[in-house]
Image (cartoon, rainbow, N blue to C red):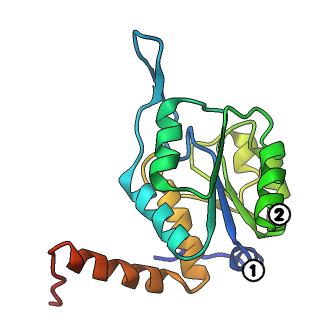
Amino acid sequence: MTPQLSAGIIERIHKVRCLVLDVDGVLTDGRLVYYPDGAVAPTGFHVQDGMGIHAALEAGLKVVLISGNWTDAVRLRAEHLRVSAHHLGVGNKMVPLAEVSQQFEIPWSEFAYVGDDLNDPAPMRSVGFCATVPNAAPEVLDQAHYITKRQGGFGAVREIIELILRQQGRWEHVVAGFLPDIEVEGFSVVNG
């Protein structure tokens, strides 16, 4: 079910060409595991978020991760998803946001940004469309154009991507593109 959005928010979503994602609390539930050898890793990533990112890339959106997290797990996830760019171990997110804008020649008004904590309101105020998760910091909730139903790490990113692509009229086309892949792998789609 598509949420009720104001005409102004829909107009902002229609312009989105680049999706910038925080990691901890957005792509993960925000919890970190410390291992005895000193390694640190997030508790996990949701497969539906990964499929959503794949759909966004297939639809022609740039997808970028900007995070204070610098762990191997996050770097590997970024590489596995083949995101357009990733900036890890970042304190001030405005610097890589400006670099991404210049690199892809996309104005900030055509960015969507998803964050959840105190280092996210500045980038959120700088872009065309911004979203967050329900358990975000109050300062982030106050900035968001959209608050997901799903928690971070449990499909919130997929929800936002689906919202953007549906509003842009691209979701059905992207979904249709996955069906031949399924049939090639030996599965058949049964219409009932």
Q: Position of residue 129 (x, y in %)?
A: 73, 65
Q: State the residue position of label 2.
A: 108
Task: Compare residues 12 and 84 and report the one nearer the observer.
Answer: 84
Q: Which quadrant, please, contains the C terminus?
A: bottom left
* Residue 29 in view (yes/no): no
Which element type, helix, strand or loop, lies under badge 2? Answer: helix
Q: State the residue position of label 1.
A: 11
Residues at marks 1 and 2 touching, judged by CB atoms closer than 8 Å: no
Residue 88, compared with residue 80, is above or below; it is above
Q: Position of residue 177 (x, y in %)?
A: 39, 82
* Residue 4 in view (yes/no): yes
* Mark closest to the chain's N terminus, 1 or 2: 1
Task: Compare residues 180 and 7 and report the one nearer the observer.
Answer: 180
* Left or right of 63, for residue 182: left
Q: Amino acid at mark 2?
A: Trp
> Mark 1 or mark 2, which is nearer to you?
2
Q: Position of residue 168 (x, y in %)?
A: 61, 82
Residue lying at 42% horizontally and 44% vertically, measured from the top left: 45
Q: What is the crowding at mark 1: few (fewer than 14 residues within 10 Å), some, or many (at least 20)? A: some
